[in-house]
Image (cartoon, rainbow, N blue to C red):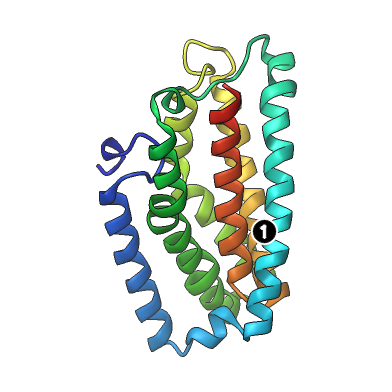
């Protein structure tokens, strides 16, 4: 329902409002369950170190992903991989999306929900390993429709024979990303690691694809 309001994933005021609502609900549930701000964000030192770790790692992975999409994928599929919505986005619109709508509509609510509340609850009940896997699978399922819609907006859309492979590959990448994010959250003792990593990965990839098309 909200998907029609955005040119880019999560890129509308409606998404931002929904994101703020989801974040608020997740924080209230966490607070009532004894998961206060300290348990989510850690100490100031942990938060700063986590942001540095998450940001640097995500930027490197995003640049590698961009290189693959621009150089590796065309060698496999036989044609360049383009994301159509970026052709209709101005510099100002992209800047607003990256700086405001993306964090409010996607990054913050997803990280608080999946690497904050869900991961903590699951770790209490199932143990850390199962909690990591559960949060990653839930994270990927949450992105299921987004993955399909995003691939449909690329040059790999039907009738391309690569459409199903691209969707399946993207789903597995999101599962793997969910596992890595959950492990980073646990190892660094702060959610600022994954907040920064999630935002910078998406931002660098979007800006890179926009700039290079």
SS under mark 1: helix
Judged from this view, the residue extending furthest toward the front is: 92
The residue that mark 1 highlights is 55
Residue 191: x percent and y percent?
58, 71
- Quadrant for the C terminus, please: top right
Query: Residue 198, can we see it?
Result: yes
Q: Which residue is at 43% across, 50% downward?
A: 102
Residue 20: x percent and y percent?
32, 64
Crowd class of label 1 (few under 14; some 14 to 19; many from 20; radius 10 Å): many
- Quadrant for the N terminus, please: top left
Q: Where, by quadrant of the figure, is residue 209 drawn? A: top right
Query: Residue 134, can we see it?
Result: no
Residue 196: x percent and y percent?
59, 61
Q: Which residue is at 69% across, 36% downward?
A: 65
Q: Which residue is at 63% across, 33% downward?
A: 169
Q: Where, by quadrant of the figure, is residue 26 drawn? A: bottom left
Residue 139: x percent and y percent?
51, 54
Q: Where, by quadrant of the figure, is residue 17 drawn? A: bottom left
> Which one is in front, 60 or 78?
60
> In the picture shown, does residue 62 fall above or below 163?
below
Judged from this view, the residue extending furthest toward the bottom is: 34
> Which one is in front, 42 or 204?
204
99 left or right, relative to 77:
left
Q: Which residue is at 44% across, 24% downward?
A: 153
> In the picture shown, does residue 198 fall above or below 27?
above
Count of labels shown? 1
């Amino acid at each position: 329902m909200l998907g029609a309001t955005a040119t880019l994933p999560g890129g509308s005021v409606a998404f931002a409002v929904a994101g703020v609502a989801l974040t608020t609900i997740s924080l209230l549930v966490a607070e009532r369950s004894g998961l206060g701000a300290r348990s989510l964000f850690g100490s100031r030192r942990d938060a700063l170190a986590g942001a540095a770790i998450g940001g640097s790692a995500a930027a490197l992975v995003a640049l590698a992903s961009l290189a693959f999409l621009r150089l590796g994928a065309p060698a496999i599929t036989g044609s360049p991989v383009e994301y159509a919505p970026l052709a209709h986005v101005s510099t100002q619109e992209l800047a607003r999306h990256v700086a405001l709508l993306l964090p409010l509509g996607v990054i913050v609510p997803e990280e608080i929900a999946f690497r904050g509340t869900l991961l903590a609850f699951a770790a209490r009940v199932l143990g850390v390993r199962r909690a990591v896997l559960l949060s990653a699978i839930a994270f990927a399922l949450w992105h299921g429709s987004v993955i399909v819609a995003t691939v449909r907006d690329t040059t790999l859309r039907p009738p391309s024979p690569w459409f199903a492979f691209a969707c399946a590959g993207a789903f597995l990448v999101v599962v793997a990303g969910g596992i890595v994010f959950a492990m980073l959250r646990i190892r660094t003792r702060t959610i600022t690691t994954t907040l920064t990593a999630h935002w910078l990965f998406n931002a660098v990839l979007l800006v890179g694809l926009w700039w290079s098309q």
